[in-house]
Amino acid sequence: MKHRAVITGMGLCTQLGRSVDEFWRNLLAGHSGIGRISLFDTSSLPVRIGGEVKNFKPDTLFGEFPEAESEKDRKLWLGLDAAAGAIADSRLPRDDFQNTPLFVGVSLETFFLEDAIPSTPVPDAAQDFARQVLNQEPRRPLQTPLDRLTQILGDHYGLNRGRYTNCSACAAGAQVIGEAFRRLRDGTAAVAFAGATDSTLNPLALGGFSLLQILSTENDQPEKACRPFDATRQGTVLAEGAAFVVMETLEHAQRRGAHIYAEVLGYGSSLDAYRVTDPEPNGRGAALSMARAIADAGLTPGDIDCINAHGTGTPKNDVAETLAIKQTLGARAKAIPVTANKSMTGHMIATSGAMEAIASAMTLHTRRIPPTINLSHPDPLCDLDYVVEGSRDFAGRTVLSNSFGFGGQNATLVFRRSDA
Amino acid sequence: MRANVVISGIGMITPLGTNPVEILRDIEAGRSAVAPPTRFDATPFSCLLCAEVRDFQPQPYVAEGKMIRLMNRDAQFAVAAAHLALADAGVKPGRAYLPEEIALFGATGLAGLPLAEVMPLVKASTGPDGLFDPGRFGQAGLRAVSPILSFKILSNMPLCFVSICENIQGTNGIYTPWEGQGAQAVEAAIRALECGDAHCALAGGCDVKTHELAFLSLEQHGLFASWQQNQAGLAPGEGAVFVVLETADRAAARGVQAYARVSGSSLRTHQPGSSRSDTCVKVLEGLNLPHEPLSAMVVADNGDVSAGDDERRALSALRLAAATVIKPKKQAGDLFAAAAGLQIGLGALLARRGSEPVLVDCFGHGSEQAAFVLEKP
């Protein structure tokens, strides 16, 4: 028997807000969360802007999560904040956590260079450097394993029905929700907890991505730097943040009278098998991911009413995604509203898919589609109905959300307005 | 196990070689690849041993040679092992199966590079006061490293290279960073076959723990504690192992003689406050093992005294024993994210030659613990 899966709790920690209401209000208003990075000195880097979560004070978390106090990986704190928000929002009784699987999306490990470099001359030999780092007091780990948030959340909430740390880059946030959805649908679990966290706003990550030349260097106009589908787009803007959802089977949610935001209806994934540096230019892999999600949802392309695009603002990605949407939806493609949240948030890498899942659920829940900002010069190669005029009323019943990762991993989710 | 899933191909890049049959023979003969490292100096660490893959050349497995410079060693191993597994199964994407019909699930370990690759950046980013200087980092540090550094530390890259080199386009997922995540990858592949997301799946993992940065992390996170307390412990290894999974019907239709049928799996989360051996017991109980004897066991013992004791206690509590017991991690090194693949691959070889089930333990670090039962198809 197949069960229906619904979203009953959502939590965010983003540059546009740390509550779903605040995030959604800013998204609908077209506010940009991108600005100068204040977390560290970026003056010598080619990229000095990002989607930073400002005024975030991790010490406010340590009362509830004392085990996080000794950690120093910012994405871990962002994740705890969003996860706690989702669980509080769901009002799920603590007893229901015990048989709950946990799915966490992450991407890049953070290396703490600034801590690792000892305040003595750096030796020439690697083994001497290793010895210095090991002898440091207090102990300063060079890196935090990517499953650390998974472990803290799992232990704290007693989530013991499998803990999964998915590192599928920009597809991770969508994949974890897709995997949670599958567990609910097949009856393996009645409640599942999924989300993602990321912060690439540190020297090594920002510097490393700068070298790949996929980032906008428009440091003087940060709020306009991320321009998905615009003819003048120059690249994406890195961001940080976390987004988590509580999902339940419909019957479980109804039994406890839970508030339902939206139903998760389908999930699909694919691989470009093309290049690690570029998306497949015709959108083949992306189209396959979308087609799979639609089929998994038991729908046809004609049933899709809105698309929450991956829309990074890189020249190649936006064209490939446009082509993929056309392949998937055929003649209807130009009639379907498309929105790109990254125009306001920047690219949260692993978190993007989870954040956009929440935006998709809110689109259905509030019947409003957020705009794609900074799209003022239409690109002839990107010729869909992008929502540019401001937020738009939405009477449709389904939203499809795309997430396409570095290296060619693709994931798509389909959501439906809850009729429960 | 709900569906009739078989293992039809095995690909291994390990410190004991690349031929699965010879690797099993070496392990049964007691040969070991564990030795002092040749590529770095381990004297700063509590553990002085590791298991290295010697004389590995990626060129035969990567059609586009310039792609090799984008890959770290983990990715090179992954591509090679995946290629060997598919070749062993006789699966050529686009022939036996369409590329989109083949799933890819894998595990990768803690990110890391040999310190020799990172040291130029570290030195160039250090100010006269000996501290990290962001200005120097941007002006000189970044210029001291390869512009493709990010590709070498992004955890999903090894499997993306596998998809590119082998033209695999199907459903996918990548988990990190310990042994249990390798088992999760195999379980995810089985699920994909069961629900019809894929008709064939490549599952496994890759990891490289044979450089200073890896040893630093393992030491800092307490994984060498057994060496400090007992003068014995795990020897980090490196390598990649993938298996090809298909439904028995599809394998038979292709005329393939499978190695083993996956007749049971059990994945459990270790709960804080409970003992590791209790968790192992729960994992093994979850297999619903038949009362008939086991023909062989592939145990997870990696040399860590405490972990080995926990596993022995669990096996003993359930009175599980077999005539053949192998401990691959003690001889091939602990391959961490690739360990489950190695355990399962060797278990499949043992299953093919025995008439009773083979128990494969995939216990390890982190919270996720797993075991599988394999039988002759």
Image (tube, coloured by chain):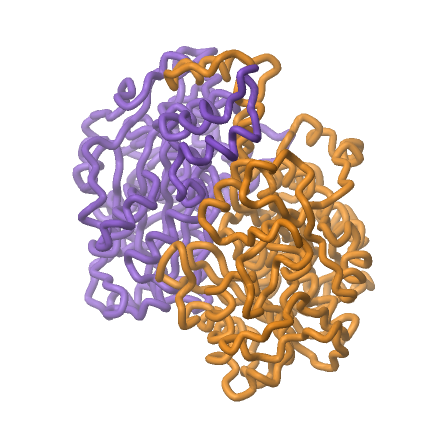
Chain colours: A orange, B purple
Q: Position of residue A149 (x, y in %)?
A: 62, 39
Write the residue at 33% across / 58% down.
B164
The answer to whether A34 appears left or right of B359 in the picture is right
The answer to whether B235 appears left or right of A245 in the picture is left
Write the residue at 47% across / 40% down.
B180
Q: Quadrant of the C terminus of chain A?
A: bottom right
Q: Quadrant of the N terminus of chain A?
A: bottom right
Q: Position of residue A279 (x, y in %)?
A: 42, 63
Relative to residue B231, is residue A356 depicted above or below? below
Write the residue at 63% across / 53% down.
A194
A131 or A165: nearer the viewer: A131
What count of labels does the image hold?
A: 0
A314 or A308: nearer the viewer: A314
Relative to residue A6, is residue B208 depicted above or below? above
Q: Position of residue B8 (x, y in %)?
A: 26, 56
B333 or B219: nearer the viewer: B219
Q: Is residue A266 visible?
A: yes
Extreme residue toward the front, this view: A220
Q: Is residue A260 visible?
A: no
The answer to whether A286 appears left or right of A246 in the picture is left
Write the residue at 29% across / 42% down.
B77
